[in-house]
Image (spheres, grey):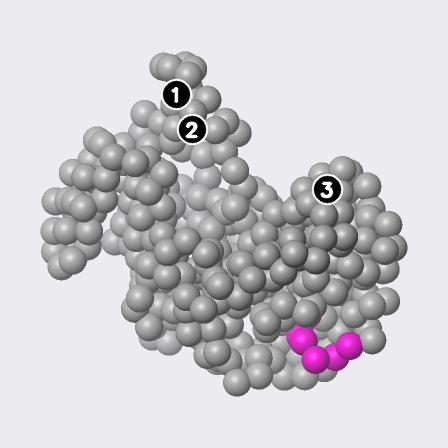
Amino acid sequence: MSELVKVEQEDPSIVARNTVLKIGNKRILTPCRALHLREKKECEAVGVTDLATRGLNEIYRRLKFNTLHKLETDVSYQEQFNASIMNALRKIPWQVELTLLFVEYDSQRQIPADKQIEYLFDLIYNQPTDTLIPPVLRDVSPTAYLDFLNRFFQLADSYNRKPIFGLIPYGSHRDLSMILDFYLSKGVTLFAMDLKGRHPFLVSTQLGMITRKLQETRKEYNQDGYLHGFNTGSGRALRTLEISPAKDILSFYSGFDSFGASHVPLKLTPDLYQRLGTHAKTPPIRFFNRDDYGYYREDIANVKGLFASRGDLASQIDSINKITDMNKKRAFQRILNAREQGVEARNIRQKIQERELKNYLESKSQVKREIKQVIEFGAKMKLTKAL
């Protein structure tokens, strides 16, 4: 096993730590907020320019069943797909920043045929990204996914150039335990857990199992693991609430070294929401406040006054509020929230160094209920580690 992860410091009471992830000549410090990278300029990875909060990016591609067939048989279409990834990478300093490529394939609830698996492997492996991540198979059970992984790794075992992030799908404790054991048997200790738009507390049992197994691997093989949160959600908030708790940022206190935004689409499209009128509306624009870990509704709360002391932040929010195109407005909201979460990741890293993380977390007034869960989870995991 190669040394890809170095743990610099762990918090004594909370499952949080400072690590260095080094792949090739690329190096990131964690906790770290991954930035969503798209071809469009209105995306997190392009909009967040502060170098201190950059370093890790996510590219996400969703393939329909018919799309994969077209990619296999139409050279021009495949070239367009490959070009879309390269065009996105050119928008960032990709030669020095780490990029994770996630491909979600709608296999119509079936394991892809062997030829399809071969093509998926070649399609993902030969992209100019830094790691190999098995594709997400939409609506496929974890047990069936394990069968898929056995075939996928028959191809992956023939190559050793790219480190592998084991994709842990959304599923039950029993099913995920089998998948994790499979990855560990292959020497994989870097993982990306699909939360499917949920926040960490909804999968605390599975998360505890993953944390425990990584601790066991570290003790037995002296090899540190890594856990990335894929499709991380902030939790459902009642539309009428002015402030909702930012449960996604608590990923850094729950065992995740990094996390990215959720790519799970809304249940209804914006135009359908509009046609339904008052019976259903798009979720309101909310801004993340790192002072108290709340998401503030821009149409109710005085967000401009709230962030008045933050220099350009208040003026950026004011500019966003003037945008009439709802899709663009939401895109800029995501950029701003990602930037603030990136700054907060850096703050958490500093508090871990100062051994002040618990006190720092307890100062976040909008997540008081969740703080108790974080501390209890940390106590259980520290007990496990001592056994």
Q: CA distance from mark 3 to mark 2?
A: 25 Å
- What mark, if any, has residue 65 been given in the picture? 3
Mark 2 neighbour class, 10 Å CA radius: few under 14, some 14 to 19, many 20 or more: some
**Mark 1: amino acid:** Gln
Q: Which residue is mark 2?
A: 270
Q: CA distance from mark 1 to mark 3?
A: 30 Å
- The quadrant of the image that shows the N terminus is bottom right
Q: Main secondary structure of the magenta part?
A: loop
Report x, y in % for residue 341: 35, 57
Please say if 44 is above or below 373.
Answer: below
Q: Is residue 195 left or right of residue 355?
A: right
Q: Is the Cβ of the residue at disc 1 closer than 8 Å to that at disc 2?
A: yes
Disc nearer the start of the sequence (1/3): 3
Please say if 310 is above or below 262.
Answer: below
Is 161 a magenta residue?
yes
Q: Which residue is mark 1?
A: 274
Q: 186 or 365, which lies in front?
A: 186
Report x, y in % for residue 39: 46, 56
Residue at the image point whose x is 13% and y is 59% from the top: 311
Disc nearer the start of the sequence (3/2): 3
Report the mark closest to the observer, 1 or 3.
3
Q: 29 or 61, which lies in front?
A: 61
**Mark 2: amino acid:** Pro
